[in-house]
Image: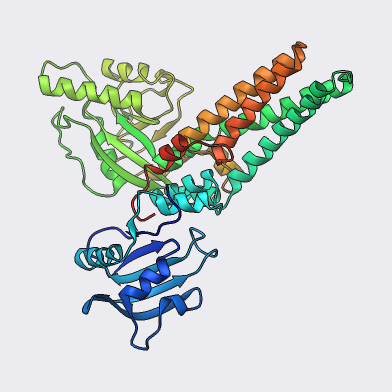
Amino acid sequence: MHLEDTIAAISTPLGEGGIGVVRLSGPEALRIADRVFASPRGRRPSESPSHRILYGHILDGQEVVDEVLLSVMRAPRTYTREDVVEISCHGGLAPLRRVLQVVLQQGARLAQPGEFTKRAFLNGRIDLAQAEAVLELIKARTEEARKMALGQLQGRLSERIEALRERLLSLCAHLEAHIDFPEEDIQPQSLEDMLAEMARTEEDLRALLQTYEEGRLLKEGVRTAIVGRPNVGKSSLLNALLGQDRAIVTAQPGTTRDVVSEEINLGGLALRVMDTAGIRESHDMVEAEGVRRSLQALREADLVLAVLDASEPLRREDLTVLRSLQGRRHILVLNKADLPRRLRTEELPSSSPQVALSARTGQGLEALRGAILKSLCLRRQAEGSQPLLISSLRHKGLLEATLRGLGAAREALSTQKPLEIVALELREAAEALGQLTGSIGTEEILERVFREFCIGK
């Protein structure tokens, strides 16, 4: 990547809108703006103070392309720490593309996906974990996901990672001092202190790693499968949760033949709720395929809502569903609570959370919503605030690599292996943490991080 050129791109989604933004960043941004911008008062972007907005028109030669507001932001107080110009024009596809074409003709280069954020990283404004948080913030679909991403963008995760990495580097420096001066034996007390510090650091790393599942659910949404035998009210439950008739509901068994998926926002969590075909033996080829997909959705779900008909005794198909729940996060939904109860709760697994409701009347629906949140967010609710979470699979892998290296170092030190081996393991652990924030990185890592960004960010 060349940082000496000037890049440009459309930074707002393509389509019809009131306003669209074309962004430029680089050493020639202001001079390119001078060549394409005409102000009624003769103001030139290159002569404007920083963080000012100028009114005027974008010109292609003598032709007026659009009426715009042009924002001037001078380095280093910009997103990329370079000179930045943002042209706010009308948000239709034609004016945006034409404005971009004009600035490209005057010497700017079309930006690559994520190149503005990549320049912010390379110029030291943000680290790699914060750069990834930019994308997470853009993709956030709920308030909780937004808070998590914003906390990472503000550097909370980076500060924690760098503090842990500094502890590893300090241990490594202490060991290497003994390697350089072998006549100075490590005293028993010093050895115990180092082992204790390694154990504390390992515990802190493990605690951070254990937040991944909650962070992933906030970021990606909770895959929630509604399962059960035919005609227990699965589609009615989906419609009740959505507050609209999305799934077809009839008295005919086997109405749902495929997985119907919808997304709802529940207490800051995005739930991707899947209504599945009734689980039973079937000789109908289409229904059998629906049952196969139901079982697959159950296996892949983060949460299973197993629906039972409380107005009837348990059937063989119900027992099949209950057996499939072993080892999975689930809630037993005892539907048709508005009818006389014939289901015996003592036949149900005592360890399974249960909620009685009527999908037809809405009775018990709030209790189910509370049970869902309780099953997914116990730690977040207990703390009463947004804890520090990791949500990236890359971060999870690097923390696991750090723990492996630190564990190997602690084992080598406690068994009195050569100090060079201990130091090597500690350095590898510190390097893994360095890759998380970009303190240590390669072009391959950067390519993997930024390739998911859109052009213009």
Identify the residue shown where x is 38% and y is 21%: 325
Identify the residue shown where x is 33% and y is 65%: 21
Quarter where residue 289 is shown: top left
Q: Is residue 386 left or right of residue 294?
A: right
Q: Is residue 367 above or below residue 5?
A: above
Identify the residue shown where x is 39% and y is 44%: 270
Color style of the picture = rainbow
- Front residue of 452 and 32: 32
Across and down, in percent, residue 249 comes to 18, 38
Quarter where residue 277 is shown: top left
- Front residue of 80 and 267: 80
Tell me the quadrant of the picture where the C terminus can be found.
Answer: bottom left
Across and down, in percent, residue 159 comes to 64, 45
Residue 132 shows in the view: yes
Across and down, in percent, residue 450 comes to 41, 43
- Front residue of 232 and 269: 269
